[in-house]
Image (cartoon, rainbow, N blue to C red):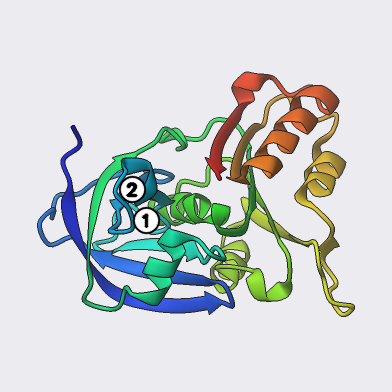
Amino acid sequence: MPRWKSAIVQDIQVVSPTTSLFRLALPDNPDFTFKAGQFITFDLPIGEKRLDRWRSYSIASAPSAKVLELCIVRVENGRASDYLFGEVEVGTTLTYKGPDGAFYMPQKLIVPSVFICTGTGVAPFISMLKDLDERKGFSQPIHLIFGTRTEAGILYRDYLEDLAQREPNFKYDICLSRAADNWTGHRGYVHEVYTSMYTGQASDIQFYLCGWSNMVDEAIKQLTEQMQVPERNIIQELYG
């Protein structure tokens, strides 16, 4: 059985109309360690059965951070969302277990990587990027392709821009499916971006996918069937 521990909410920051950053202190687990890309699971007081109560969220902070940061989107009529966004406040104690998950990078990069994500699926990639940034680990090119609906939903925008300016081996592209008329970046869905950029040259690239299951399923189809990327070069994490 999992060993559950307590986390205390230290800060809640609204970062988009539907998304907030929850920062957690772990007073009874000072030696907590994780690999960038992993997640923790909450046991929330929202139901009787385990499947009703358990919710998993990727960690967005670097492994060196003393406070865990989670990037959580509010799901309409979701029981977990109603609790986290309606009842949880600074000082609330949450019960969690973890870390868990195999969605992480090797300690030393030997091939280029492409991160493809939608919405809060960017969170584990932010953890990976922060970790690489701290360790000066950008030994290979990394390209983040981030899809969301509108410009208001671009998460961690300032950090991504700053990192791209400082680190020659990092670049990112934003793709908006409901872009305003004045948006000058990519429009539509992330699939159009990576297929146009990497078809015919993807054999030595590691692709990491994180987001809603429909996006991940379509990406795997595009990568394996259209772009002939070996399945061993694709690592995925599903959200819903």
Q: Is residue 189 left or right of residue 90?
A: right
Q: Which residue is mark 1?
A: 62
**In terms of secondary structure, where does tag 2 sit?**
strand
Foreground pick, 152 / 230: 152
In terms of sequence position, does the residue under pointer 2 or pointer 1 come before the other?
2
Residue found 75% across the figure and 36% down from its top: 218
User: Where's residue 65, x and y in %?
Assistant: 29, 60
Foreground pick, 185 / 5: 5
Q: Name which residue type carries label 1.
A: Ala
Q: Is residue 130 left or right of residue 218?
A: left
Q: Which residue is mark 2?
A: 40
User: Where's residue 186, x and y in %?
Assistant: 83, 61
Residue found 44% across the figure and 57% down from its top: 130
**In terms of secondary structure, where does tag 1 sit?**
loop
Give the residue furthest to the left.
28
Res 104 visible: yes
Viewport quadrant of the C terminus:
top right
What distance separates the C-alpha of mark 2 from that of mark 1?
14 Å
Res 202 visible: no
Please identify, in this view, whether the residue under mark 2 or under mark 1 is nearer the observer. 2
Viewport quadrant of the N terminus:
top left
Q: Quadrant of residue 222?
A: top right
Total numbered circles: 2
